[in-house]
Amino acid sequence: MQNLAIQMKCPYDPTQAGEVSMPIDLILPMSPDDAPRTYAPVGRCIYCGEKFAPRLGLEHIIPFGLTGNALMLPKASCRECAKITGKVEQFCLREMMGKFRAVVGTPTRRPKERPSQLSLPLVLREGEGRYTFDTEIMLGPDEFPIFLTGLRMKSPGILEGAPDSDDGRWEIWAFHDQDAISRLLKEHPAENAAAYMGKIEPLAYARMIAKIAYAHAVSVVGYGSMFPLVTDLILGRDNLMCRYVGGEWDIPPAAEPTSIHQLDLSLEEAKERKFLVVTVRLFANLGAPVYKVVVGEVP
């Protein structure tokens, strides 16, 4: 994967609900005029509000493992909150997206540890959702079938006045190279063979999306400009993901091949309340889902 560029389209001006936004497209290739965007230091933890922490760390708005140093928010997280968000991101980037990242070549802090061979376990279906591991195929990143998972979600419950429940508001989404997988399975003698592509933990993924959205909102409007609504979810104190995190159930077509990740901030009204809503679309060029996160409430 080539370097990413940042494209800012318009300033933020919260004057009329639903009519203002601040989109960011991360695009390629990077031109000499493009550079990582570093926002003004916050000076306190954006998650717990701690101002006198011994050391406030740098926040990557989108995890380093997806964009490198493309969008950075200095002095924005205390050590304790960084441990929590880091653990969630580590699971998502390694367990859910590790092989995908190796295939497409996203940034890594440990390039020497990136494997030259990837394991593709094959399983035998036994019916009723059960399976047993059978064998594995070792493939180089250039041979490994591309596979990306995410969540297809309805609009955040708070915008619809929906009950506080995750039931029926999300489902697993996957992008995969079916032809490549089928070719590999043809080499297996069993008719019930299938490829085991990895894990997905919906709540962890929703927490990472919420963290991206909230950090982006703080970078644009500033800490203290809203009453935050997703910090409990980000820090694991709230396990109800669909109240503030949702998306577009009808997933739009894939973006242009050069448009990798997309962020957009807008003001929306619901039930006579005003909310800051961040739209997040990771790997928009692959037709991945669009997420909408209600990050905060404003007067």
Image (cartoon, rainbow, N blue to C red):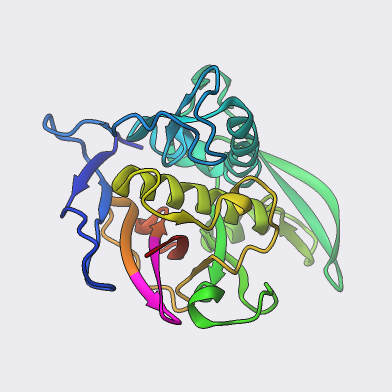
Residue at the front extreme, as displayed: 299
Provide the residue span drawn in magenta.
268-278
Specify whether residue 105 is painted magenta.
Answer: no
Is residue 256 visible in the rendered image? The answer is yes
Q: Which of the 4 quarters of the picture holds residue 152?
A: bottom right
Considering depth in this image, is 239 or 206 the residue closer to the camera?
Answer: 239
Q: Nearer the viewer, residue 293 or 47?
A: 47
Question: Measured from the top left, where is residue 22 in percent x and y?
Answer: 24, 56
Q: Position of residue 128 (x, y in %)?
A: 86, 74
Residue 5 image point, x, y percent? 24, 39
Queried whether the magenta region covers residue 274, the answer comes back as yes
Please report the residue visible at 49 percent of the width from the left and 29 percent of the height from the top: 51
Query: Does residue 62 sit above or below 82 in this rendering?
Result: below
- Majority secondary structure of the magenta segment? strand
| Observer able to see residue 146 | no
Task: From the viewer's perspective, tell me whether residue 37 is left or right of residue 122.
Answer: left
- Of the 4 image quadrants, the one containing the N terminus is top left
62 or 225, nearer to the observer:
225
Q: Quadrant of residue 32?
A: top left
Q: Going 23% across and 42% down the picture, which residue do you hit?
A: 6
Q: Is residue 236 left or right of residue 72?
A: right
**Relative side of 98 to 72, left or right:** right
Residue beneath the point at 49% across and 24% down: 56
| Residue at x 69%, y 42% (from the top left corner) | 137
